[in-house]
């Protein structure tokens, strides 16, 4: 029904033509990321002189989210915007069905990890995506672990000495995606497949929680990015972080004068790793058909093999299409870069996305709270998981 309503709205706006048209593009890419995005949009302008993209940096992700919430509520959203999946579920009625406007070569190019539908609709496509990988100190971890057991052995052997600033691993309590990765690797899930039951506290969920709790005894717990600790000279044997954090982590290690390398995550029942980063969406309210078509053209341009490979090379994100990730440009780029090759292999082997439940944003807030309780050892893993499950059950 929503799809029909959006089609009707777009048709009512008139067909229009891709002549002189201006669209707004809200994003959260600062620093070098913003510079690269600006370069790509300038290239788009050169190829499409009839379209002007007003690229507007809205600050970080939190600021972008709040501005989008306000803009959608006021009926004045941008034409195009970056957004997370858990934001998308809040305003599905305002979004355009992109499969009506994107070319077939774009629609058929996504890696299967990114084939996401919201209530049966394709309202976003992947853009700046990264994957969780393992960063490790080769001087402390000669051979990166490939299993949970090896991971735990290394972490406990390195130990924890706060006075000397030595830790086996590190956890950021505000980042529950690490726990969701462990949960998925154990074969668990937040909800049953049909979303009717909460399953996060079953045997697999408890196994993941107990493993995380054991590691946390030897972990640096800091809400700041781990790169900050590395730069200050704190020794961390290995830690899980995004591929997008590569440049920051490596620069921190260089400043501290210590080695740092990247490997795929250790595996358990499977080798899952949670995908991070945002998607692109097009909004229908107050947009003409010509503006919507122009926005779709920008998306297709950004996802074109040459451009998405360039974006990945410059930013630390990963290609999101089969044509790009298996293409000559990216494969040549990673041929002599073991870290980027490991990141690519991790995405292909086990990348998975957010739960596309309409209340996932609220569930994630609960996950943040209980993940912090878990790693700080505030109660037993079973008590924490049972309490978390009860709260999720109340809102699902």
Image (tube, rainbow, N blue to C red):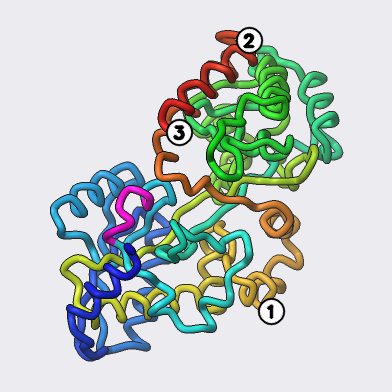
> Which secondary structure lies at badge 3?
helix
Residue 289 visible in the displayed image: yes
Considering the numbered disc 2 on the image, is that residue within a helix, a strand or a loop? loop
Nearer to the camera, 56 or 192: 192
Alpha carbons under labels 1 and 3: distance apart: 40 Å
Q: State the mark number for residue 85.
A: none
Magenta-highlighted residues = 88-94
Could you give the CA–CA distance between mark 1 and mark 2, rounded to whole angstroms? 50 Å
Q: Is residue 14 left or right of residue 378?
A: left
Q: Where in the figure is residue 113, as x and y percent of width and height? A: 61, 59
- Left or right: where 109 falls relative to 134: left
Query: Can you identify the residue that label 2 sits on?
Result: 380
Compared to residue 261, the image places residue 367 above or below, namely: above
- Image spot of residue 39 (x, y percent): 39, 72
Which quarter shows the C terminus?
Answer: top left
Magenta-colored stretch includes residue 337: no
Q: Which residue is mark 1?
A: 328
**Disc 1: CA contacts within 10 A as few (<14), some (14-19) or many (>=20):** few
The first of marks 2 and 3 along the sequence is 3
Residue under label 3, please give it.
363
80 shown above or below 306: above
Choose the circle earlier in sequence order: 1 or 3. 1
The quadrant in which residue 296 appears is bottom left
Q: Residues within 10 Å of mark 3 (few under 14, many from 20)?
A: many
- Pointer 1 or 2: first along the chain: 1
Q: Residues within 10 Å of mark 2 (few under 14, many from 20)?
A: few
């Amino acid at each position: 029904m929503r799809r029909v309503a959006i089609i009707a709205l777009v048709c009512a706006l008139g067909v229009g033509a891709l002549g002189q048209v201006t669209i707004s593009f809200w994003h959260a890419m600062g620093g070098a990321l913003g510079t690269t995005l600006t370069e790509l949009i300038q290239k788009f302008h050169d190829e499409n002189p009839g379209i002007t993209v007003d690229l507007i940096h809205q600050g970080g992700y939190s600021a972008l989210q709040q501005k989008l919430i306000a803009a959608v509520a006021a009926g004045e959203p941008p034409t195009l915007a970056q957004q997370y999946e858990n934001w998308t579920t809040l305003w599905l009625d305002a979004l355009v069905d992109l499969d009506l406007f994107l070319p077939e070569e774009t629609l058929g190019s996504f890696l299967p990890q990114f084939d996401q539908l919201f209530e049966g609709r394709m309202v976003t496509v992947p853009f700046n995506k990264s994957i969780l990988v393992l960063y490790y100190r080769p001087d402390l971890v000669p051979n990166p672990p490939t299993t949970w057991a090896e991971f735990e052995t290394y972490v406990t052997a390195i130990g924890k000495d706060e006075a000397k600033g030595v830790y086996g691993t590190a956890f950021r309590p505000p980042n529950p995606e690490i726990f969701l990765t462990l949960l998925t690797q154990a074969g668990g899930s937040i909800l049953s497949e049909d979303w009717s039951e909460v399953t996060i506290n079953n045997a697999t969920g408890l196994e993941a929680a107990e493993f995380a709790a054991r590691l946390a005894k030897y972990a640096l717990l800091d809400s700041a990015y781990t790169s900050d600790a590395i730069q200050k000279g704190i020794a961390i044997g290995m830690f899980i972080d995004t591929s997008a954090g590569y440049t920051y982590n490596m620069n921190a290690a260089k400043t501290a004068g210590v080695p740092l390398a990247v490997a795929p995550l250790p595996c358990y029942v499977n080798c899952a790793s949670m995908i991070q980063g945002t998607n692109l969406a097009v909004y229908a309210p107050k947009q003409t058909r010509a503006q919507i078509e122009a926005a779709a053209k920008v998306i297709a341009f950004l996802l074109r093999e040459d451009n998405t490979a360039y974006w990945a090379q410059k930013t630390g994100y990963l290609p999101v299409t089969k044509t790009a990730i298996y293409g000559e440009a990216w494969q040549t780029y990673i041929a002599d870069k073991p870290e980027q090759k490991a990141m690519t292999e991790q995405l292909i082997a086990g990348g998975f996305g957010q739960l596309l439940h309409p209340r996932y944003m609220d569930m994630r807030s609960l996950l943040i709270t209980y993940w912090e309780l878990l790693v700080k050892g505030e109660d037993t893993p079973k008590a924490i998981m049972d309490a978390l499950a009860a709260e999720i059950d109340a809102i699902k």
